[in-house]
Amino acid sequence: MNFDTVALHCFLAVSDSKSFTKAAEQVGRTQSAVSQQITKLEYLLGKQLFKRGKLLLLTKEGELFYGYAKQIFTLHCEVFDRFKEPELEGEIRFGMPEDFASVYLSDVLIEFSRIHPRIFLNVECDLTLNLFERFKKGHFDLVLVKMSRPEEFINGYDIYTEDLVWIGDPKLIKQDISKSLPLVLSPLPCVYRSRAIKALENSDIKWRLVFSSPSYNGTIAAVKAGLGITVLPLTMVPPQLTIIKEGLPILDNTHVSLLKLDTKSQALGTFEKFVINKLKH
């Protein structure tokens, strides 16, 4: 039984996006072509991989196959990257927000270093606006920021736009919103903090800061303890925490972009592509 990487790529894209349309955009093929690849996989396996409906959800067999498909496709990409550019070397100064570091950093470092062992990554974490100011001063080669790509940096890439959501115990709204809503937020100049306060003040909702930490893990711990409510991107919400869908104002979206120095460094370009691919999938 042979699985071609195109079929696996389509399967992973559909699994993650739960949509043939979105998957087609990700893999650069038509919706019909993606559907045909899924049908081919199901025929080869003799199993139904998706439950068809408004959303495409994995069956039990599909969930089992997902793990294997991810490993095979990742290894395929690593092999070609490793032998395509085996001599890349140098140092890359990379800045990223602390919450992204907590969720993605270990995977980025381990996978990229395995493929390109001669490239040294010097990684620093900070708040987005601090990263942006330091990038303008030349402290970084590449930064990941939670803001739209500034027009003065043509070597930038808008990765995606994501919904911000309120997280915490819904009971805190009923108990405290008539007085002041307890918030768990990062210190200034945090983008999520400004989005949360702007939304509350535009809705005439009083608030008070009960816990402040630049650490993603510290914020999660405080919310788990019931100290207050916070704001996070939808994809960064831990399964143990509750998304509050009613009683609070809608938040402005967050935009995730990569900014790169104007350089022809092949190592930097390779790392940029790797980060974009990692975050998009």
Image (cartoon, helix red, strand yellow):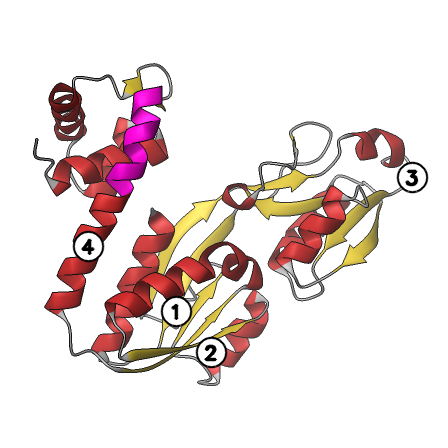
- Outermost residue on the front side: it is 1
| Tags 1 and 2 touching, CB below 8 Å | yes
Query: Element at badge 1?
Result: strand
Question: Mark 4 is on which residue type?
Answer: Cys
Query: Element at badge 3?
Result: loop
Which residue is the site of mark 2? 135
Which residue is the site of mark 3? 179
State the residue at coordinates (15%, 32%). 30
- Residue 224 sits in which quadrant? top right
Q: Which badge, 1 or 2, is on the more N-terminal residue? A: 2
Q: Main secondary structure of the magenta part?
A: helix
Q: In this view, does 255 lie to the left or right of 230?
A: left
Of badges 3 and 4, the one in the foreground is 4
Query: In the rendering, at what x and y percent does residue 252 appear?
Result: 58, 45
Q: How far apart are marks 4 and 2 (CA)?
A: 30 Å
Nearer to the camera, 36 or 116: 116
Q: Which badge, 3 or 4, is on the more N-terminal residue? A: 4
Magenta stretch, residue numbers = 58-70
Query: Element at badge 4?
Result: helix
